[in-house]
Image (spheres, rainbow, N blue to C red):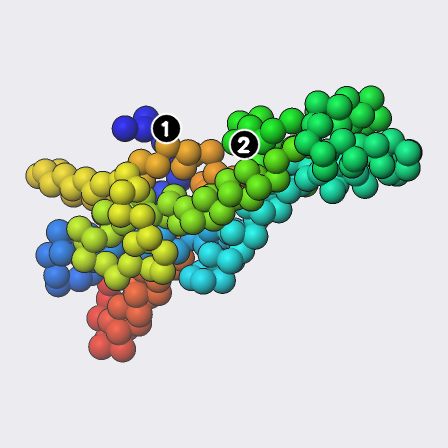
């Protein structure tokens, strides 16, 4: 189980929730489950590949397509295909580029790699499964390849596998949402094995309902913390509007709120 936590300042949301609970006739546990379900669905709706930049509403199949294209972009900007190596060498020497291509097409990748190294100062090697690129993925776009690969089919297969798992992180919310009886947003049910759970604690002092996404790389996702904070802001706004409507109703009846 992951021990990495994303910390969000939830004071404003908690205050709005407390006001809502105090002004409702329903039981506290019923209200907490209801609001937990609504908040957690909102969080799932902004979990990559959904969400995009903070406040964006990219969801469903549009988010899926964007996430899959991002994988292609990230890997192809880091790993240069043989054709890209040829073009980069050609910009410096047509003769060297032709020699490189001849060696590569005839399976002499060691000799082709020597040309890449001498002209471009980089490696021409079999695809490493993405190991060397993990620290670069998702960051500012690079103008140059990290290195060039001699077997592009392996890269393409790796990219296809990653694209099939584009909803894995978001699916980490699935177990908790099912336990709360929520309608699952598109993509959340793609990977039932994605780790996560619901934790409910009820004492005389407090009611706690926690949704845990235990996908190991969740904390490493860029802007994930901001996306969750945005989801809480959305629900805070909804609760505040409910409270203001309650105050307005009281005013119409000529009553004063305590």
Q: How many other residues sit within 10 Å of disc 2, few (<14), some (14-19) or many (≥20)?
A: some
Question: Is residue 71 in view?
Answer: yes
x 58%, y 47%: residue: 72
Q: Relative to 237, say whether 100 is above or below.
A: above
x 61%, y 35%: residue: 151
Which label is found at residue 220? none
User: Which numbered mark, 1 or 2, is in the foreground of this view?
Assistant: 2
Q: How many other residues sit within 10 Å of disc 1, few (<14), some (14-19) or many (≥20)?
A: few
Whole-Å distance between the Cαs marked 1 and 2? 23 Å
Quadrant for the N terminus, please: top left
Q: Secondary structure at mark 1?
A: loop
Q: Disc 1 marks which residue?
A: 4
Name the N-terminal-most of marks 1 and 2: 1
Q: Disc 2 marks which residue?
A: 130
x 81%, y 41%: residue: 87
Name the side, left or right, on which 100 lies relative to 157: right
Percent coordinates x, y for residue 121 in the rendering: 79, 23
Question: Is residue 144 in view?
Answer: no
């Amino acid at each position: 189980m992951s021990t990495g936590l994303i910390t969000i300042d939830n004071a404003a949301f908690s205050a709005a929730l407390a006001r809502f609970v105090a002004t409702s006739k329903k039981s506290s546990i019923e209200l907490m489950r209801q609001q937990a379900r609504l908040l957690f669905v909102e969080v799932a709706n902004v979990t990559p590949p959904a969400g995009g930049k903070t406040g964006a509403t990219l969801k469903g199949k549009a988010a899926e397509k964007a996430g899959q294209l991002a994988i292609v972009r990230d890997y192809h900007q880091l790993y240069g295909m043989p054709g890209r190596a040829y073009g980069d060498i050609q910009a410096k020497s047509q003769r060297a580029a032709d020699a490189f291509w001849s060696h590569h097409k005839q399976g002499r990748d060691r000799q082709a790699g020597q040309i890449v190294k001498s002209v471009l100062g980089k490696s021409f090697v079999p695809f490493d499964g993405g190991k060397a690129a993990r620290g670069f993925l998702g960051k500012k776009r690079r103008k140059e390849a990290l290195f060039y690969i001699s077997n592009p089919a392996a890269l393409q297969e790796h990219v296809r596998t990653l694209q099939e798992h584009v909803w894995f992180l978001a699916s980490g919310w699935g177990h908790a949402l099912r336990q709360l009886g929520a309608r699952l947003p598109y993509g959340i049910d793609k990977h039932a094995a994605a780790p996560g759970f619901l934790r409910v604690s009820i004492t005389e002092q407090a009611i706690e309902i926690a949704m845990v996404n235990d996908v190991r790389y969740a904390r490493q996702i860029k802007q994930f913390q901001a996306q969750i904070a945005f989801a809480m802001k959305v629900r805070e706004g909804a609760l505040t509007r409910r409270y203001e409507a309650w105050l307005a109703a009281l005013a119409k009846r000529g009553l004063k709120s305590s």
